[in-house]
Image: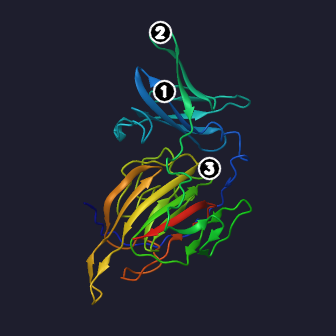
């Protein structure tokens, strides 16, 4: 059983005050959007993955992983991760990257190095568009559909014209132990960074936050996508690029209390992000920042935080245990 305890104070989250352009439709973005994403292939005879992050105004960052992309072969050695800055000249169709073993160009289809292997073939990495293996998973018999299939059990938010749930939603149904499936799409905000870039959060029982944030290509900290604030960072950063549909699949056990209201055991959670386990049997020592209520034996809702960014959700269902 994995247990991590923190004595850091619980600080409520504030709405982002900064104004940044946020794209919510993949068919209507900017010219940098087509370059960002994931690329996979071989460099120097070894499988390599590259994530390219758009940072606005023709600026980019490339992050290279030995063994393959996160969740697809990367060896997990953060000190071996490669970084390079990239930029696109006015009128150019490619982005040029320089630095830390990632010198090359990207055109949205390939990342090419202008180097050749022993067979004389130019070394290239092809763009890949990964999808979660649980994307579109149908609710099994007995599941409670919170959003989808014409149902909407949430209050405090709205539904877009194309049928997606917006941030700031709280389920009317409340839960103790449960299995949860949720699909979410983070906005494309190239000129934003950190906590101002596609921020929301999934609150289990309205008490424990699993962060939702555009952390594509980042280190994977406890305040980034898949992290649980002040408790645990994800075992691997499985965040896909913005405007890609992603999934959380959660197994949650509520904290247990005796008749006097004294806590007997902590809440516990196992989470898969895009099909990869990022937390396994993780104990939650207490509520996280921004919680709707204190810990108790009472069930709690599913809450999707409004942090000022247009995050979208669909296909949300729960199985009570």
Could you say which is closer to the camera, residue 225 or residue 155?
155
- Mark 2 sits on what residue? 119
Q: How is the image coloured?
A: rainbow
Determine which residue is flagged by label 1: 41
Instruction: Return the residue nearer the eye: 93 or 152.
Output: 152
Q: Which mark is residue 243?
A: 3
Circle 2: element type:
loop
Q: Residue visible at 42% across and 54% down?
A: 272
Across and down, in percent, residue 173 comes to 52, 77
Query: Where is the N terminus found, in terms of image quarters?
Result: bottom left
Nearer-the-camera pick, 250 or 156: 250
Secondary structure at numbered mark 3: loop
> Mark 1 or mark 2, which has the lower sequence index?
1
Residue plotted at (60% across, 44% down): 55
Residue at 74% from the left image edge and 47% from the top image edge: 28
Image-quadrant location for residue 264 = bottom left
Quadrant location, the C terminus: bottom left
For the residues marked 1 and 3, what is the alpha-carbon distance in whole angstroms? 23 Å
Q: Is residue 145 visible?
A: yes
Near mark 2 (Cα within 10 A), the count class, few <14, some 14-19 or many ≥20, is: few
Q: Earlier in the sequence, mark 1 or mark 3?
A: 1
Task: Give percent across and percent down for residue 270.
Answer: 36, 60
Residue at position x 58%, y 60% from top? 315
Q: Do the numbered discs 3 and 2 sit on residues whose CB atoms are within 8 Å?
A: no
Residue 12 at x, y percent in the picture: 47, 73
Q: CA distance from mark 3 to mark 2?
A: 38 Å
Q: Residues within 10 Å of mark 1 (few under 14, many from 20)?
A: many
Dot 3 or dot 2: first in sequence order is 2
The percent coordinates of residue 227 (x first, y second) are 42, 58
């Amino acid at each position: 059983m994995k247990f991590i305890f923190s004595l850091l104070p619980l600080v409520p989250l504030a709405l982002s005050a900064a104004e940044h352009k946020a794209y919510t439709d993949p068919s209507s973005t900017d010219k940098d959007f087509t370059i960002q994403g994931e690329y996979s292939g071989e460099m120097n005879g070894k499988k390599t993955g590259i994530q390219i992050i758009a940072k606005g105004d023709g600026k980019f960052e490339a992050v290279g992983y030995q063994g393959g992309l996160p969740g697809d072969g990367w060896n997990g050695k953060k000190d071996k991760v490669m970084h390079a800055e990239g930029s696109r000249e006015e009128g150019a169709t490619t982005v040029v990257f320089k630095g830390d073993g990632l010198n090359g160009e990207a055109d949205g289809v390939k990342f090419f190095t202008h180097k050749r292997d022993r067979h004389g073939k130019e070394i290239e990495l092809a763009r890949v568009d990964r999808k979660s293996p649980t994307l579109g998973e149908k609710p099994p018999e007995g599941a409670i559909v919170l959003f989808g299939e014409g149902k909407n059990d949430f209050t405090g938010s709205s539904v877009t014209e194309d049928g997606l749930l917006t941030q700031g939603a709280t389920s009317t149904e409340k839960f103790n132990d449960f299995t949860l499936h949720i699909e979410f799409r983070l906005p494309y905000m190239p000129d934003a960074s950190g906590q101002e870039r596609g921020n929301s959060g999934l609150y289990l029982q309205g008490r424990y936050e699993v962060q939702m944030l555009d952390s594509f290509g980042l280190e994977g900290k406890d305040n980034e996508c898949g992290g649980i604030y002040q408790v645990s960072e994800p075992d691997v950063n499985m965040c896909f690029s913005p405007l890609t549909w992603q999934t959380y699949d959660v197994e949650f056990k509520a904290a247990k209390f005796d008749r006097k209201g004294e806590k007997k055991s902590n809440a516990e959670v196992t989470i898969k992000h895009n099909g990869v386990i990022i937390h396994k049997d993780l104990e939650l020592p207490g509520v996280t920042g921004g919680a709707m209520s204190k810990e108790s034996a009472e069930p709690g809702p599913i809450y999707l935080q409004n942090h000022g960014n247009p995050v979208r959700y669909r296909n949300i269902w729960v199985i009570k245990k």
